[in-house]
Image (cartoon, helix red, strand yellow):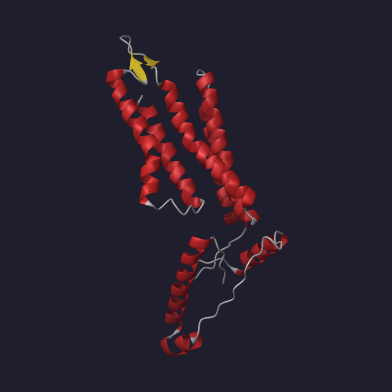
C-alpha cells in the first residue's frame, strides 16, 4: 500500500521532468505546477484515507490487501500523466525539424509507452513480473539514448557551454534539408565589439569571462525561442 502511494508522486515528478526537457513554456509557472499536481495530491490523499475507509484498498482480518471500489481510479490517474507526456512528445516529434531533437522526444515517448503498457499488463496478469522487467528495460533504453551523443562525440564548447562547431555543422545540414518556403529558418552571426581590446588590456581571463557572460545571455534567449547557438 505504501509503495502504491509513492507511484503517483513518482509519475508526477517524471511528468515535470519530461516537460522541462521538452522546454515547455508553462512548466516553470506556478499555476502549471498547481493544476497538474492536483491529481497526484488527490491520489495520495485517497491512499492515506483508505487505511480507514477502504476506498482504494482494504486490509482484511487475515492481514491481506484487497482492492477497494475506487481502485481502478488509481490506474486512470497514473496513466493520465503518462498519456500527457506521450502526446506532447509525439507532437514535438512530428513537428520537429532537427533530427537530433526529434530522436530525443521519441526516446521519452517510447520510455513512457513501455511503462504504461507494462502497468496495464500487470493489472491484467497480477502474478507475472512483467511490470518490473518492462520498467528495467525502459530505463536501460532511456539511459543508452541519453548517453549516445556524449559517447560518440562532444557537442559542447568547453569554455562557454554552447554548441561547438562540429555540432553546428551537423545542425545546419539537418535544418537545411527540412527547410521549405513555408518553413524557413533564420541564421544570425554575432561578434563582440571591442573584444580584442578586452583581451589586450585586461587579459585573456577577463576575455574568457566576457565570452561566458555573452554566451549565457544568448542561451537564455534560446530557451525561450527554441533556438540553437554555437561558437
Number of marks in picture: 0
The x and y percentages for residue 3 are 38, 28
Q: Look at the picture and state if 4 lies above or below 9.
A: above
Picture residue at 38% right of the left edge, 42% below the top? 35
Would you identify the image quadrant in which residue 137 lies? top right
Residue at the front extreme, as displayed: 182
Picture residue at 52% right of the left edge, 33% below the top? 135
Residue at the top extreme, as displayed: 62
Q: Is residue 55 found left or right of 230 in the rendered image?
A: left
Q: Is residue 40 found left or right of 189 in the rendered image?
A: left
The x and y percentages for residue 27 are 43, 50
Do we see residue 142 in this rendering? no
The x and y percentages for residue 142 are 55, 43
The x and y percentages for residue 229 are 56, 67
Image quarter in which the N terminus is found? top left
Picture residue at 59% right of the left edge, 46% below the top? 91
Would you identify the image quadrant in which residue 226 lies? bottom right
Q: Look at the picture and state if 202 lies above or below 39.
A: below
Do we see residue 166 in this rendering? yes
Q: Look at the picture and state if 53 lies above or below 46.
A: above
Image quarter in which the C terminus is found? bottom right
Amino acid at each position: 500500500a505504501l509503495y502504491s502511494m509513492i507511484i503517483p508522486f513518482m509519475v508526477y515528478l517524471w511528468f515535470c521532468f519530461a516537460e522541462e526537457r521538452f522546454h515547455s513554456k508553462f512548466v516553470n509557472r506556478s499555476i502549471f505546477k498547481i493544476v497538474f499536481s492536483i491529481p497526484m495530491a488527490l491520489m495520495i490523499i485517497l491512499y492515506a484515507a483508505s487505511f480507514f475507509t477502504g476506498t482504494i484498498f482494504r486490509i482484511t482480518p487475515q492481514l491481506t490487501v484487497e482492492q477497494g471500489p475506487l481502485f481502478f481510479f488509481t490506474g486512470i490517474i497514473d496513466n493520465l500523466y503518462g498519456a500527457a507526456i506521450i502526446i506532447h512528445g509525439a507532437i514535438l516529434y512530428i513537428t520537429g525539424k532537427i533530427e537530433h531533437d526529434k530522436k530525443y522526444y521519441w526516446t521519452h515517448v517510447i520510455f513512457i509507452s513501455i511503462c504504461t503498457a507494462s502497468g496495464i499488463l500487470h493489472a491484467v496478469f497480477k502474478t507475472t513480473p512483467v511490470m518490473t522487467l518492462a520498467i528495467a528495460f525502459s530505463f536501460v533504453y532511456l539511459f543508452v539514448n541519453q548517453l549516445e551523443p556524449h559517447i560518440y562525440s562532444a557537442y559542447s564548447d568547453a569554455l562557454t557551454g554552447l554548441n561547438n562547431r562540429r555540432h553546428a555543422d551537423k545542425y545546419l545540414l539537418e535544418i537545411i534539408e527540412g527547410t521549405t518556403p513555408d518553413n524557413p529558418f533564420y541564421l544570425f552571426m554575432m561578434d563582440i565589439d571591442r573584444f580584442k581590446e578586452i583581451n589586450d588590456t585586461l587579459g585573456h581571463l577577463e576575455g574568457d569571462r566576457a565570452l561566458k557572460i555573452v554566451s549565457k545571455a544568448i542561451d537564455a534567449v534560446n530557451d525561450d525561442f527554441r533556438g540553437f547557438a554555437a561558437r
